Image (cartoon, helix red, strand yellow):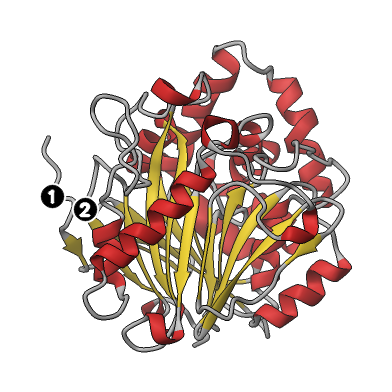
Amino acid sequence: MKVDRDLITTEATLVGDFEGGQLYRVGTLDIAVLNGTYKEMGRQYGSLVKDKILSTRDSWKKVFIDSGTLSYESILEVIGIPFYTSSPKKLKDLYQGISETSGISLHEAVVLDNWLSLVVTGRRAGCSCYMGWGDKTIDGSLYMGRNLDFPEFARDLFAANGVVAVLNPIGGEFSVAGIGTAGTIASFDDAMNSEGLSVNVLNGVGSIQPVLYSNRLSLISFLGDSLASYSTIEELKILFNTTNPGYPGLISVGQPDKGVHFEVSPETYFAKESPDQFSVRANQFTYPDWGIPQLPGATGWFSMTRQEAWLKAIDAAKTTKIDEHVLMEVMTAPMWNSDGTLTGTGFTVFEHGQIGSAGGDEGADVTMIQVISQPAERKWWIRVPTHTGWMEIDLKKYFKRT
């Protein structure tokens, strides 16, 4: 089926409701709007996207258990039990609520929320992110574009079972929205809160070898939890000064008027605001404080190549100032030519095996999803390459706190 990759779908249709929660659909994406206590929101989510949760669980069972890669017991030992133990009560309540209405067990709910940890441990993933603001953009506000690169089966799974979850908790916490496959309720790779604080996560294994601590809150859950309580980059710096998460990553953090990349290891982090009003990262730590040299080519998982391509594509496409349409244009640029050579001006991997032709057996990765964020307007544009055009999500319609 030929996909109009430039099509922008904006219309949201109400397709279901349960115990005070609503389910909308934009294109192929479900938007689960959850309201109330965390237990109530978990119950709403489990019921509203039950079919997709069960489908996602069965898909991961085939990938990990039926293939013989991992046993059910080992998954519980690595993720299901320790990640539940380290979760705050509100997250435990979410898991409990999901298990009550979806037909999956409590520990399966934990695993579905944290499945990324099973895939990224021990591999390099080719994600990348560009942020521009101030003089770089059409209105001075921050615009963020990111590619989430992952094994191709994950792209197919997201195309079938992608869900945007919007949590509107009772009380003083901020509303939080996140993007993931069904079952992802807190460990979002891409998330934004009602104050416009926006984050996405790039794998840091390209610089720091994987360490997955079982006695700490997972990095991605840590971020999702922090968005309920914090609204600025400066507050997140204080949080990282206080708590070290259990996995290395590069975290793109944007607020309505600026952005910064956090480079985080289980021991420390660095984050310095750019005077150039832009920041771009792939999967290697670049702050000189680390003392870690960037590695070129396949050895560095083409991080330098992808960063340079982002900047070249932005410069070539920018007729006036950056907005979502400029980012949509540059994010169509392929990283590889059809003969397996690098284009030098693109960073998106559309077809299976292109990275593998030059980068070794880790190269089954493709660009799973693409996300453009404008925190000032609380907006996302999301695309699943080869499956969909862009789907616009106006979070102001769903956040109860704005």
Q: Find residue 210 and report its horizontal and vertical position in percent.
A: 75, 36
Who is closer to the viewer here, 231 or 161? 231
Image quadrant holding the N terminus, namely top left
The crowding category of the residue bearing disc 2, from other C-alpha atoms within 10 Å (few below 14, some 14 to 19, many at least 20), is many
Who is closer to the viewer here, 17 or 81? 81
Look at 22% across and 68% down and name the residue there. Answer: 10
The answer to whether residue 48 of the structure is visible from this angle is no
> In what element is the residue under mark 1?
loop
Who is closer to the viewer here, 401 or 100? 401
Amino acid identity at mark 1: Asp
Badge 1 or badge 2: first in the primary sequence: 1
Q: Which residue is mark 1?
A: 4
Give the image quarter of residue 176: bottom right
Instruction: Give me the disc on residue 389.
Output: 2
Q: Find residue 140 and report its horizontal and vertical position in percent.
A: 40, 88
Question: In the picture provided, is 383 more to the left or to the right than 67?
Answer: left
The answer to whether residue 192 of the structure is visible from this angle is yes
Who is closer to the viewer here, 321 or 167? 321
Q: Find residue 119 and report its horizontal and vertical position in percent.
A: 60, 32
